[in-house]
Image (cartoon, coloured by chain):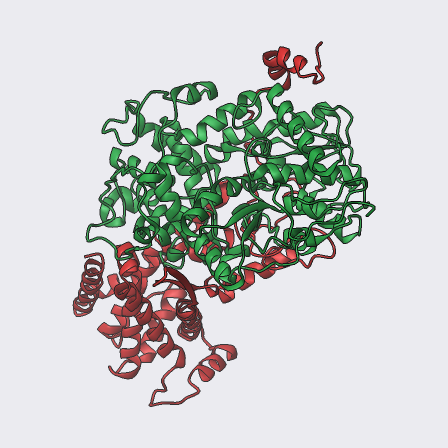
Chain colours: A red, B green
Amino acid sequence: MSALAPLALVLLLAGLALAGGQFSGLRPVLGVLLPYAAFVTFLLGVCHRILVWVRAPVPFRIPTTCGQQRSLPWIRQSRIENPSSTAGVVARMALEVCLFRSLLRGSRAELREGPRLVYADDRLLWLAALAFHWSLLVVVLRHLRFVLEPVPAAIRTLAAVDGFFQLGAPGLYATDVVLVAALGYLLWRRLANPQLRYLSLSADYFALYLLLGLAASGLLMRHVVRTDVVAVKQLALGLVTLSPIVPEGVGSLALLHLVLLSTLAAYFPFSKLMHMGGIFLSPTRNLANTSRAHRHVNPWNAPVATHSYEEWEDEFRDKIRAAGLPLEKG
Amino acid sequence: MAEEAPAPAQLAQVDYRPPARDWREAAVDFRKGTYCYSAAPKNLQYLGLPNPRPWQPHDADWKLPPDWKQTILAGMKDRLERFRSFRLFMDICVRCGACADKCHFYLGTGDPKNMPVLRAELMRSVYRRYFTLPGRLLGGLAGGRELTEDVLKEWFYYYHQCTECRRCSVFCPFGIDTAEVTMMGRELLTLVGCNINWILEPAANCYRTGNHLGIQPHAFKDSVDFAVDELEEMTGIRVEAPINKKGAEILYVIPSAETFGTPHYYTLLGTLLLFHAIGLDYTLSAYASEGGNFGLFTSHEVMKRLNAKIYAEARRLGVKWILGGECGHMWRVVHQYMDTMNGPADFLEEPVSPVTGTRFEQARSTKMVHICEFTADLIREGKLRLDPRRNDHWVATFHDSCNPARAMGLLEEPRYILRSVCQRFHEMPESTIRERTFCCGSGSGLGTDENFEMRMRGGFPRANAVRHVQDRFGVNLVACICAIDKATLPPLLEYWVPGMNVAGVHELVGNALVVDGEKARTQDLRGQPLVSPEAPAGA
């Protein structure tokens, strides 16, 4: 059920986009109004979410330490897994953001006869996640050629490298293949693993379906359905230069692609996809483990009732005296 | 309770297949052996906590205050605004499942709600329903869930089936720490009086007398004196163990269990002997007679109230700095909270070892040093005479306690000490030690008898790794630096790995330590015969 409803929703969106593209009156709605509305929602939404996070203080320094602390000079510190300097934190965060360091620790536990618990390395999730995120980044960068004129050399080089294998015409991009394969694995994993299927929410599938829909419509336009690239670029350029038009040559499939993209953008700030910004703020990762060396200040450190020594001595005075322990007040 | 528990062979039949029922339908079966009893009203009253009343988790009616729901939701709102960690961890989980089989309770129960991701979803679903736009508009469709009494009961059950060990946060790509979620869960439950007694009684006792068991000053002194006498009998040396001594250089704070519990007690003997050997000018305190802090398992507020005694006492006694004993969660509090909550400790001096002159720079603000940091330095600087053969009856392994490992990174210091005082030492498998260490299954205040089955389940992965080194290397001793470990590993290992022993690192130090003027040792600090007794002195 969690897996089917969002699929129906994405298919419905795609159907509406395809149908809407047939009506000239609706084309500006799908090609102009919707993208603008989505973009504004994305921008305001993401800013709002990040502001909410940033406004909440970090009252305590709570890094998860994954290696040896800095202590005695002759004990080798794990400078990245348990950083005590800004450089160490930056390195830790860079590894986390660029290489998914924590996910790389992946393992699978298995209970065997005996009973014996065995732990095997399991880096498939790490690999698929890394493949997906990096290829998505390249795909997004490649798309800049639609909104930039002239197309910067760096983007053209990127596209050329990406199309290195020169399979078919127009050439198949390696990242397109990797992107779809990785998304496919991530979806398959959610469905095939009983524990994961059990905990997955509609939202988890919805994001995957949207991305798969985007990839599929993009691939169709490039490799199967004849697409007027000039018209598409006109549409894209018009949008970014705030002089939008929807040229005749823009087909339904291109509009569908745009509708799915708009949906993703508008959905983004309300969803788990915000992990993109959140990872930078995670207090278990972005703080140095220096809480004993440097005082960390809690802005709301409120006073609390305590049981003072004087109260304690008053309560136990006779016993303290009988035990021969020193007293403050005879 | 222990007699009623299922046999190990039965408990090891873990079914990891999730049930057919949707997890969002809250319903908990409070089955004996798998949950902790409610806190006695007197303990809530003593701490001034809300809604003291007699009730039990297995009752249908929990006697919640009429406005409990508003209280919880207002409490959530407040905490979402005060803790970035809480807000962020509610928002950014992608449910990738990397954490799922990293939790010892999941591995031991197969209950999907013990997967860290679902444990947090129990709270997130309520967060989404009341604090996010899609959840408010779409409810269940957006993954939201109404806050009902059943949901609250589920929170109680599963937030007391998490030991705040932070293992899952090591594997999470965003560093989401279930301990933070569980701490919030327990704080919220505290707002409506749903606490467990095994946590609140020690907390209330500690607030009043200074330690978990409610040992009063004269009894505390008796215990320490008894230890001094015993030590003299064993070694022929009369050590000094000052209490509440003003002007001492160092305040030594221990988990109070060392004064009455075994095997903790042998650790106390070891440290008393060590301090004598190096001529340390220190004092214990009967007021701050507890390093442990069950406030950590209740709320940030109670944690701060209990922790305040340490600095207050250090100031009153006029010591230069503070040394802390072998205790796991105490070090989570000392390392990550104390200075922030109750500092600045500007009335103390930067800790410097009076024996070696080593400056403990890592503690220059908090001014509190871990006994393993202190002793490792002594050994490294050649200030101790050690005869590791006196530990030849032990084949040791080291269990990293969760908090020193994952909230501090104290990994090599205890290992260095162990290798210096003990000739036979073997590590457990890599996936079960250091930052990946498995909890004893009874941490964070869950080590009570009525919770026996759940503890055995939660401790199963740890015990399993111990059995591995028992089979492979003949290990017969698990060394550790945590008072809860010392209390709960023995029954756990008795259950899963019979014949295994548990000791503090400084017990082994005490065994190996050669002290001027001691008589020939024929026994270790437990009174067990040494493998090769020494010839009497002078023979």
> Which quadrant holds the C terminus of chain A?
top right
Q: Residue at x 60, y 17 (%)?
A: A312
Residue at the front extreme, as displayed? B539
Q: Is residue A35 visible?
A: no
Residue A137 position in % (x across, y down) = 44, 69
> Which quadrant holds the N terminus of chain A?
bottom left
Instruction: Please state which of residues A269 and A256 is positioned toward the viewer in this rendering.
Output: A269
Q: Residue at x 19, y 61 (%)?
A: A4
In the rendered structure, the answer to whether residue B232 lies left or right of residue A48 reads: right
Residue A267 position in % (x across, y down) = 32, 55
Instruction: Please state which of residues B176 and B109 is positioned toward the viewer in this rendering.
Output: B109
In the rendered structure, the answer to whether residue B6 lies left or right of residue B277 reads: left
Position of residue B423 relative to residue B402, above or below, is below
Residue B539 position in % (x across, y down) = 81, 48
Q: Is residue B189 visible?
A: yes
In the rendered structure, the answer to whether residue A118 lies left or right of residue A186 reads: right
Quarter of the view holding residue B42: top left
Instruction: Please state which of residues B102 and A323 is positioned toward the viewer in this rendering.
Output: A323
In the rendered structure, the answer to whether residue B257 lies left or right of residue A119 reads: right
Give the mark count.
Answer: 0
Position of residue A137 relative to residue A263, above or below, is below
Q: Residue at x 78, y 49 (%)?
A: B385
Residue B7 position in % (x across, y down) = 32, 48
